[in-house]
Image (cartoon, rainbow, N blue to C red):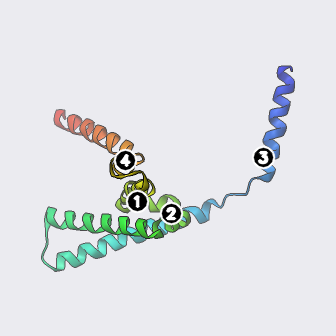
Amino acid sequence: MTYKKQCNYNANYLEYVRRLEPKTKHFKNCAAAFGVGGLICCIGQFFRFMLQFAGLTGDVLAGCVSVILIFLGCMLTGLGVYDRIGRYAGAGSIVPITGFANSVASPAIEFKTEGWIYGMAAKMFTVAGAIIVFGVISGTLVGVIYYFL
């Protein structure tokens, strides 16, 4: 088969795929991501106000709010609710801290039948491991740059 025929077959196939694929709804997807991500952040801000009203301040306040949001993300993942939120909101559900909790808890729940060590513990960081590694590397680089400036 000549190169020209191959290119023609590829162009025909791409046209066929374009006709069959569903049209994406970019505005709806962006609005859902913005709305759900904002709602998650508003829930975190609500907990921050409540804990601040209870007398917490500074790092203790920030740590408690983070722990509450991580707990809620893991609980909703375990109940299967966070998957439905993710299907609706897309990136809006993975950006806040609850999305990170979901990315750690979801593989742990999925592979728990393989045992504690080779299943849950080994698979827990399959998705989040890269995030942790690149977060530590980028944090170190920013720290070094900040140190020298």
Quadrant location of residue 93? bottom left
Q: Are marks 3 and 2 in contact (CB under 8 Å)?
A: no
In the picture, residue 43 is in which quadrant? bottom left
Quadrant showing the C terminus = top left
Q: Earlier in the sequence, mark 2 or mark 4?
A: 2
- Residue 145 appears at what percent x and percent y? 23, 35
Comparing labels 2 and 1, the label whose residue is closer to the camera? 1
Q: Is residue 136 above or below residue 86?
A: above
The residue labelled by disc 1 is: 102
Q: Amino acid at mark 2?
A: Gly
Q: Find numbered disc 3 in the image and state the secondary structure of the residue it sits on.
A: helix
Residue at mark 4: 125
Tell me the distance, in whole angstroms, between the alpha carbons under discs 2 and 1: 10 Å
Q: Position of residue 73 (x, y in %)?
A: 37, 65
> Measured along the vertical axis of the image, is residue 113 above or below residue 17?
below
Q: Is residue 10 left or right of residue 51?
A: right
Amino acid type at mark 1: Asn
x 21%, y 39%: residue: 143
Q: In this rendering, would 37 be left or right of 143? A: right
Q: Position of residue 67 (x, y in %)?
A: 25, 65
Residue position marked by numbered label 2 in the rendering: 86
Q: Earlier in the sequence, mark 3 or mark 4?
A: 3
Marks 1 and 2: in contact by CB < 8 Å? yes
Neighbourhood count class around disc 3 (C-alpha, 10 Å): few under 14, some 14–19, many 20 upward: few
For the residues carrying marks 3 and 4, which lies nearer the camera in this image?
4
* Dot 3 amino acid type: Val
| Residue displayed at 17% across by 36% down | 147
**Residue of label 3:** 17
